[in-house]
Amino acid sequence: MSGPGDAHVAQLVADALTAHRDGRIPNLDQIARVTSSTVSDGGAAGSRLIDLWSLGGWHLQVWPDRGLDIGSAAVAGMPISWTSAVGPAAPVDDLLGDGWLRAFSGGLVTTCGLQNVGAPSEGHGLHGRYSHLHAGEVRVERRIVDDSVVIEVSGTVDEVAALGPHLQLARRLRLDVATATIEIRDTTVNLGDETVAAPLLYHVNIGAPLWSGAARLQVSADDVQPRDAASEVGLDAWDRPPPVAARAAEWVFEHSPVSDAEGWAHAEVHQPSVDRRIRCSWDTATLPRLHQWSHRRAGVYVLAIEPANCSTSGRAADRAAGRLPTLSPGESRVTRLRVSASFT
């Protein structure tokens, strides 16, 4: 699977930096810009928002009050991420059962965990609490690195109860302007004194117009299996946008990822009508599993690429299968996810 081509963007950025150094571009905002604000109305009113913009490439919205997840994302003016009918939303407190869905905005990256992923299980709601937790110690930094500009957003997110488990995730989100690559590096540590379940899944959500028409999904994997009978219906068409169908059930597949020489696996969406590619890559050492969510229902219609360390059936199912990820007291785990773009 070939990677996205970004040589022209790299040259564009290198030329712009030359112009910045000799004074023709006096403000670095013309190459990479960051703005922080507070949303004033709508479902996300009162929420902190960080907008990232890069020359020739990404425009991202990062939400500190949603665990520093990535909301809407566009590449060279073309929307890439999927936005649900809910739209941007503030976090909610009642996450039992499927309460998580009431504020599932979509966006490019939604993190699921830190104590449950998938179906409600063992007193934990669908997909856990992470994407409804506020980040603290939020910091934004922009700097020139060789022939590129790098923007980093960092912070910490605690899932904690006064008399219960304490998991802390330290996130570093890095945008490299010249390579048009976003990297999320998360370090999760168990600060409590008991071993706790610690499943994690990254919901990378792709929508139309990228995921439509003649688009195709390629995955570095040697097997794909449907999660259930409803998903088996779509097994022959997992790699392409299906026709819209009213009241259709979701399709969920699990792929068996194959790593490259550096230990990374890849999934790539190509839209030939505009020759646009988006690649999702992840470190399989700590994210050994890959799920795919495909929903063809009218009013939903989404593709999600989901690197994970667990199933989507909930912690009880993983425990019964002997595959429940855990962290011992003081133990930490590093997970890495990259999303890169080609806009030739």
Image: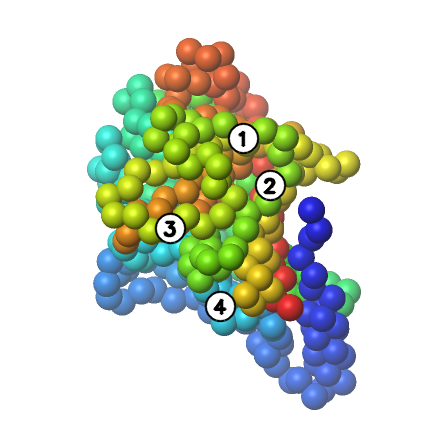
Lower sequence index among marks 2 and 4: 4
Give the residue at mark 1: 224
Disc 1 and disc 3 in contact, CB within 8 angstroms:
no
Q: What kind of residue is marked 2?
A: Val
Q: Secondary structure at mark 3?
A: loop
Disc 3 and disc 2 in contact, CB within 8 angstroms:
no
Lower sequence index among marks 4 and 1: 4
Position of residue 56 measured from the top left corner of the image (x, y, whole percent)? 60, 72
Give the residue at mark 2: 219
Would you place residue 24 above or below residue 222 in this image? below
Disc 2 and disc 1 in contact, CB within 8 angstroms:
yes
Give the residue at mark 3: 243
Lower sequence index among marks 3 and 4: 4
Lower sequence index among marks 1 and 3: 1
Q: What kind of residue is marked 1?
A: Val
Q: Quadrant of residue 260?
A: top right
Q: Quadrant of residue 23?
A: bottom right
Residue visible at 60% across and 64% down in the picture: 275
Front label number (2 vs 4): 2
Residue visible at 77% across and 65% down in the picture: 146
Q: Secondary structure at mark 1?
A: strand
Position of residue 195 measured from the top left corner of the image (x, y, whole percent)? 47, 17
Give the residue at mark 4: 78
Compute the Cα span from label 4 to label 1: 30 Å
Position of residue 42 measured from the top left corner of the image (x, y, whole percent)? 23, 63
Compute the Cα span from label 2 to label 1: 10 Å
Lower sequence index among marks 3 and 2: 2
